[in-house]
Image: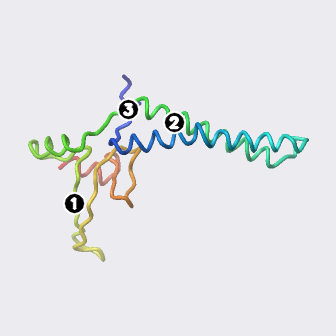
Amino acid sequence: MDESKITLVTRDGLIALKKELDFLENTRRKEIAARIKEAVSYGDLSENSEYEEAKNEQAFVEGRIMQLTEQVKYAQIIDDEAAQQQSRKQMHVQLGNRVKIRALNGKNAGIVLDYVIVGTTEADPLEGKISNESPVGQLCSTI
């Protein structure tokens, strides 16, 4: 398998990808098709902004469906518990590990932030998930 196609995700992350894919395929597609059908009923398509907008949205949704399909197809689950146990044995940080980062100076000195190292697909710093490919994630992985 081509390593560049692998999507590293947690179990919850894979569930979220599948849920979004299902929504786009079964709900959004139908909504957009109805909008296109309605816009076509207005007549001349050359100056029909509703039609253009719906077609653009359709292209975006179809692109996202293709992206999600690939991500789900090549998903590799990060086993959180196994990663934690292996990390303790080997004394290094890897995908699925929880890390605590403390600011040493500046206006946030002393503040401790708690993050989980995840693949790029799931990264959301506001939710406490940082990518293994982000600068902070890469730095943690070298420890």
Judge left or right: residue 75 versus residue 141.
right
Q: Residue 60 placed where, x, y %?
A: 63, 42
Q: Residue at x 56, y 39 (%)?
A: 64
Up-down relation of residue 73 to residue 134 (above or below): above
Could you tell me the amino acid type at mark 2? Gln
Residue 6 falls in which quadrant of the image?
top left
Residue that carries the numbered disc 3 in the rendered image: 6
Judge left or right: residue 37 versus residue 25.
right
Q: Residue 93 placed where, x, y %?
A: 19, 47
Q: Residue 31 placed where, x, y %?
A: 68, 44
Q: Which mark is residue 24?
A: none
CA separation, marks 2 and 1?
32 Å
CA separation, marks 2 and 3?
12 Å
Could you tell me the amino acid type at mark 1? Lys
Residue that carries the numbered disc 2 in the rendered image: 67
Q: Do the numbered discs 2 and 1 sit on residues whose CB atoms are within 8 Å? A: no
Residue that carries the numbered disc 1 in the rendered image: 100
Q: Earlier in the sequence, mark 1 or mark 3?
A: 3
Q: Residue at x 39, y 61 (%)?
A: 126
Q: Secondary structure at mark 3?
A: loop
Q: Secondary structure at mark 1?
A: strand
Callout 3: few (<14), some (14-19), or many (20+) C-alpha neighbours within 10 Å? some
Q: Earlier in the sequence, mark 2 or mark 3?
A: 3
Could you tell me the amino acid type at mark 3? Ile
Using the image as rendered, state which of residue 4 and residue 63 is in the foreground: 63
Q: Do the numbered discs 1 and 3 sit on residues whose CB atoms are within 8 Å? A: no
Quarter of the figure with the N terminus:
top left
Q: How is the image coloured?
A: rainbow
